[in-house]
Image: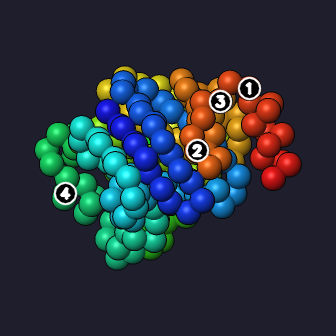
Amino acid sequence: MLKVSKLNFLNYKIQEFEILVPGLYGFVGQNGAGKSTFFSILNGDISAKGSIISSRKVMYISNLQSFDKNLKALDYFKLLSESERSSAKKLSKLFDINSFIDKKIGKYSLGMLQQFAIIISLASNSEIVIFDELHSGLDLKHQRIFFDILQHEKKEKIIILTSHHLEDVKNNCDVSFFLDKDIEVIKDFNDVENRIIGG
């Protein structure tokens, strides 16, 4: 569950917004629209006036560079709880990261780093997981794997997805929202595309 009420940040005034059931939810907006700031507020990284209520913790990796470059994926897995570690192992098999799971993170390509971050995010015992362009560096094969996994994981988690490609959101999300001074449900993606292009 996620409830936002009377939240003010940047030029935004979000009066009432809520997600009550698990699912895959898309967020789109113009570049610099404040999506990342909004997610950082949800995660508690940035304070803002208003009310935010979530039934359990939020998982949001805002900066891929926050991982210790001298550690390996296996090192991070050891820090997880038993249930989280079990989930991480299953997800690792789906992404097939065996070729680099024992390499230092500093040697990862962008795609490798994003796969690792996705695994850590979904393995966490968090009700709300936010992916802010976290699949942008994946090749087509791993993007397909990513979206297939989300269709399964959304049954138990609230998953929030952003993408510069509207088709990613349109084709995969159950409900999508447009961030433009407030949050509105997207009913017409063509209209949203025109608003983004038109600035």
**Nearer to the camera, 146 or 22:** 22
* Marks 2 and 4, the one that precedes in the sequence: 4
Cα separation, mark 2 vs mark 1, equals 17 Å
The foreground one among 73 and 61 is: 61
What residue is pinned by disc 1? 188
Residue lying at 13% horizontally and 44% vertically, measured from the top left: 82
Say which residue label 4 marks: 78
Residue type beneath disc 2: Asp
- SS at mark 4 in the image: helix
**Front of the two marks 4 and 3:** 3
- Marks 2/3 in contact by CB < 8 Å: the verdict is no
**Mark 2 and mark 4: span between their CA atoms?**
41 Å
Does the residue at mark 4 contact the one at mark 3 (Cβ under 8 Å)?
A: no
In the image, residue 38 lies at what x, y percent?
49, 54
Residue 182 in sight: yes
Residue 63 position, x and y percent, is 46, 66
Disc 2 versus disc 3: distance between alpha carbons?
A: 12 Å
The amino acid marked with disc number 4 is Lys
